[in-house]
Amino acid sequence: MDRFISMRNGGRWQGYTLACGVLLLFVAVGRNYGQSVEVTLRVEFAPGTHTRQLPSAQSPTVAWLMPLGVNAGPAPPLETHTYQMVQKDKMFDPHLLVVPIGSIVVFPNRDPFFHNVFSLFNGKRFDLGLYEAGSERRVHFDREGVSYIFCNIHPQMGAVILSLATPYYAVSREGAIVIPQVPPGSYLLNVWSESATLESLNAARREVTVQAAATNLGTVSLVTSPSPITHHANKFGEPYPASPGSASPDKVY
């Protein structure tokens, strides 16, 4: 009987110990979130071999931090939402959209004619087909990457959707980037710009350490390159009509 009582008491203390350990873990995680800081950096461009002109200060650059194993701060769950990329006046609005993986992007057609939105790049591949004025299509961005968005009818239309697997990202303003609420730890810094060469983007990728105080990552140097949106093929990999006179896209379908 004494042994039975001792076993019960021992099990009870083990339960208390486990509960206290779990509580301390939550407290530690909460402290990490409470210690979240701003991470800043600047982006500068140098002329490339294919272009002598620097992009305007408004040319957006995206920077994001990917946690590196146990040395990174705990990342909150990605908050997926529904976003819009509107087609109006033969343009996409916004031109650049950054979304967490798992988000839905709606493509409403607010022009008085047909559009055919598609993407054949390394992010999300899709072809929404022809759809008329006042209608819309939806795409689930379920993988990380850069998706260049085009219309198969109007070659002047182009945009970018960047889907990320981390909540720690920001878009530049006048060359400055501020990533908010980053817990201290080790991260992989990535940057992307429509106006930069792939080589300079790869060279800018590096491991960084976020301190318990605001962290400045210095300056990232990128080399300019013509935008992939400037000259692109249609969804069949063929050139668009050479001039509006050779075909009238708004009346073809």
Image: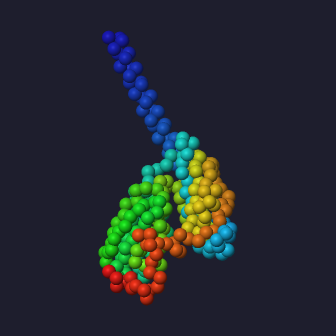
Q: Residue at x 46, y 63 (%)?
A: 121
The image's colouring method is: rainbow
Q: Would you say 95 lies left or right of 128 here?
A: right
Q: Position of residue 201 (x, y in %)?
A: 60, 60
Q: Residue at x 42, y 32 (%)?
A: 19
Q: Residue at x 47, y 67 (%)?
A: 148
Q: Position of residue 5 (x, y in %)?
A: 35, 16
Q: Residue at x 66, y 75 (%)?
A: 53
Q: Would you say 123 lies left or right of 184 here?
A: left
Q: State which quadrant residue 44 falls in.
A: bottom right
Is 3 located above or below residue 59 in the figure? Answer: above
Is 249 located above or below residue 58 in the figure? Answer: below
The C terminus: image quadrant: bottom left
Examine the rendering and report whether any part of residue 137 can be seen: yes
Q: Position of residue 100 (x, y in %)?
A: 45, 58
The N terminus: image quadrant: top left
Q: Would you say 78 lies left or right of 36 here?
A: left
Depth check: give the residue in front, 34 or 146: 146
Q: Position of residue 196 (x, y in %)?
A: 60, 66
